[in-house]
C-alpha cells in the first residue's frame, strides 16, 4: 500500500512521519529553512504548532474506511480493512499481574502494528487541503503551520493565522479528533521577534531540537563510575554509541552556531576524549588525543552529518520539499576549467546572513568544495562516501592542528601517542 501511495504521489509532500527518507531531522529543516527564507525577504513568520489528543486511538473506523475508498481501495480491500479494524479488545495489566476486564475497541488504529502508522497518515492526509496560504509540516499527528507576511501591520498576519487555525479546528471537529490545547502554541519569528531556539543557538532552552547537553552529562555521570573497569576500546565504543547520537541529531540545524555555543559543543567532545583516555592532565591540549581516536572536531562533525544528509536528499529527491531547495547546474563545455567538475550546486544570492548560514546554502558550499564529488546527484556508495568524507574532514582537522602548533609552539604529538597521528610534515615540505 505504501508503494502504491508513493508511486502515485497520493501522500502529502510535507508529511514526514513513517516514510522512507522522511524523519524528524528533515521535518525540522523544512520549517527552519522556510523561516530563513521569510526573514531573507524582510518578512516575519508566525509558526503555530498543533497536537491532537490520543489521535491514533480516536480515529473513527467508518471515516477511515471512507477515506480509503476515496484513494482507490476496492470493495474487497475495504472489507479486509473493516475486518482488520473491528473485533478488537484491550485490557490493562495491573501491578499484581492481573488484568482488567476486556473492553471492546471501537475507534483508532492498532499502535505497534505495521499498518497502524500508514492508516493514520492516510487519515490525516486531507488536513492540508483546508489551509489557504499557510505552509505546513506534519510528522504523524504533530502539525505545524507557517504563515509569512510583512511585519507592518502585524494585525494582517495575525488575522491570517487565526483563519488557518480556525480551519484546522474545523477539520478536527469534522474528523472527530480533539486538539490538545496544552501542547498547542504560536511563535513569531523574524525581525525583532525571536527566531526559534535552534536558529538562535540557545542550546539551553531547546533540548528537543539541539544538542541535549543535560542528557549527555547524565551519560557521562553514569559512565564515569565504571570507567576504571572498562578497557580503552570499550570506553571509545560507549562514547560513540551513547554520546555522539545526542551531538549528531541536530547537526544539520546548527551549522551556524555562535562562538559561545560552539565552545559548549567543543567542551563536551573534550570530555568524551578525556573519558576514553582517562589520564589527560587538565593543562594539556586535548586535540592530539582526539585526532589519535580518529574523531572529528565538533564543527567538522556537524559538517560531516549535514553533508551526508544533503547528498541523500539530493540523490533520492526525498523529501521533495527540501530537495527542491537545491539547484544543480551543469556547466557548459566552454565553462569547465581544468580539474573543475562539470556539475555544481548553485548557491543563491541572499540578502541576509540568516539564509547564507542556513542548511541549504552552507551545505551547498561544503559539497562544492569536496574533491571526490563529481555530481551531487550521483554520490559514491554510502560506505565509500562516509569513508572519503571522514578522511577529507579529518585531514583538514590535522592541518588546523599543525598550523596551531607552528603558531603557538605547541607539541604536535605527545610522547604517549607516538605514531598514532599523521606525520607532522606532509610530503614535499
Image (spheres, rainbow, N blue to C red):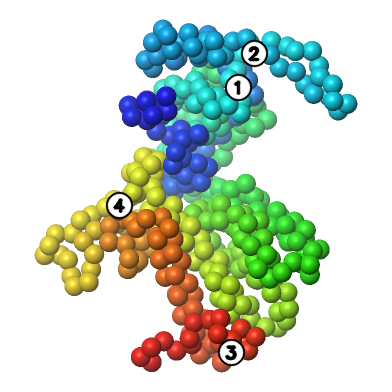
* Disc 4, SS: loop
Q: CA distance from mark 4 to mark 3?
A: 42 Å
How busy is the neighbourhood of tag 2: few (under 14 within 10 Å), some, or many (20 plus)? some
Given the current orientation, which residue lies at the most extreme left position?
334
Q: CA distance from mark 1 to mark 3?
A: 61 Å
Q: Is residue 350 visible?
A: yes
* Residue marked by disc 3: 411
Q: Position of residue 368 (x, y in %)?
A: 32, 63
Q: CA distance from mark 3 to mark 2?
A: 69 Å
How busy is the neighbourhood of tag 4: few (under 14 within 10 Å), some, or many (20 plus)? some
* Disc 2, SS: strand
Q: In the visual, does 200 lie left or right of 280?
A: left
- Mark 1 or 4: the one toward you: 1
The residue lying at 64 percent from left, 24 percent from top is: 53
Q: Position of residue 35 (x, y in %)?
A: 46, 45
Label annotation for residue 110: 1
Quadrant of the image containing the N terminus: top left
Q: Earlier in the sequence, mark 1 or mark 3?
A: 1
In front here: 42 or 90? 90
Label annotation for residue 377: 4
- Mark 2 or 4: the one toward you: 2
Label annotation for residue 88: 2
Q: Mark 4 and 3 residues: CB-CB less than 8 Å, in contact?
A: no
Q: Mark 1 and 2 residues: CB-CB less than 8 Å, in contact?
A: yes
Q: Earlier in the sequence, mark 2 or mark 4?
A: 2
Q: In the visual, does 78 lie left or right of 298?
A: left
Q: How many marks?
A: 4
* Disc 1, SS: loop
Q: Earlier in the sequence, mark 1 or mark 2?
A: 2
Amino acid at each position: 500500500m505504501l508503494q502504491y501511495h508513493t508511486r502515485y504521489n497520493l501522500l502529502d509532500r510535507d508529511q514526514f512521519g513513517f516514510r522512507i527518507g522522511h524523519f524528524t531531522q528533515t521535518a525540522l529543516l523544512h520549517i527552519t529553512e522556510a523561516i530563513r527564507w521569510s526573514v531573507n525577504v524582510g518578512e516575519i513568520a508566525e509558526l503555530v504548532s498543533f497536537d491532537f489528543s490520543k489521535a491514533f486511538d480516536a480515529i473513527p473506523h467508518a471515516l477511515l474506511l471512507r477515506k480509503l475508498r476515496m484513494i482507490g481501495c476496492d470493495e474487497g480491500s475495504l472489507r479486509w480493512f473493516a475486518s482488520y479494524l473491528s473485533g478488537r479488545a484491550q485490557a490493562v495489566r495491573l501491578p499484581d499481574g492481573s488484568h482488567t476486564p476486556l473492553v471492546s475497541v471501537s475507534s483508532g488504529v492498532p499502535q505497534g502494528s505495521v499498518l497502524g502508522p500508514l492508516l493514520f497518515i492516510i487519515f490525516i492526509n486531507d488536513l492540508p487541503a483546508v489551509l489557504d496560504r499557510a505552509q505546513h509540516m506534519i510528522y504523524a499527528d504533530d502539525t505545524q503551520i507557517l504563515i509569512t507576511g510583512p511585519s507592518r501591520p502585524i494585525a494582517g498576519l495575525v488575522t491570517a493565522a487565526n483563519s488557518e487555525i480556525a480551519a484546522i479546528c474545523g477539520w478536527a471537529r469534522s474528523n472527530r479528533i480533539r486538539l490538545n490545547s496544552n501542547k498547542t502554541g504560536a511563535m513569531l519569528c523574524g525581525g525583532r521577534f525571536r527566531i526559534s531556539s535552534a536558529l538562535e543557538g540557545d542550546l539551553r532552552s531547546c533540548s528537543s531540537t539541539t544538542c541535549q547537553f543535560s542528557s549527555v552529562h547524565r551519560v557521562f555521570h553514569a559512565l564515569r563510575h565504571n570507567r576504571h573497569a572498562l578497557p580503552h576500546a570499550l570506553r571509545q565504543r560507549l562514547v560513540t554509541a551513547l554520546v555522539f547520537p545526542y551531538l549528531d541529531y541536530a547537526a544539520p540545524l546548527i551549522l551556524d552556531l555562535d562562538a559561545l555555543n560552539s565552545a559548549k559543543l567543543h567542551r563536551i567532545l573534550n570530555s568524551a576524549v578525556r573519558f576514553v583516555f582517562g589520564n589527560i592532565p587538565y593543562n594539556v591540549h586535548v586535540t592530539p588525543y582526539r585526532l589519535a581516536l580518529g574523531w572529528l572536531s565538533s564543527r567538522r562533525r556537524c559538517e560531516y552529518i549535514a553533508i551526508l544528509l544533503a547528498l541523500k536528499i539530493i540523490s533520492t529527491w526525498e523529501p521533495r520539499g527540501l530537495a527542491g531547495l537545491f539547484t544543480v547546474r551543469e556547466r557548459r563545455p566552454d565553462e569547465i576549467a581544468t580539474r573543475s567538475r562539470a556539475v555544481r550546486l548553485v548557491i543563491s544570492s541572499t540578502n541576509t546572513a540568516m539564509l547564507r548560514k542556513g542548511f541549504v546554502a552552507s551545505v551547498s558550499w561544503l559539497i562544492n568544495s569536496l574533491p571526490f564529488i563529481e555530481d551531487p546527484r550521483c554520490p559514491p556508495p554510502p560506505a565509500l562516501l562516509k569513508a572519503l568524507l571522514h578522511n577529507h574532514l579529518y585531514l583538514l582537522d590535522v592541518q588546523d592542528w599543525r598550523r596551531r602548533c607552528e603558531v603557538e609552539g605547541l607539541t604536535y604529538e605527545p610522547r604517549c601517542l607516538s605514531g598514532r597521528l599523521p606525520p607532522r610534515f606532509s610530503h614535499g615540505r
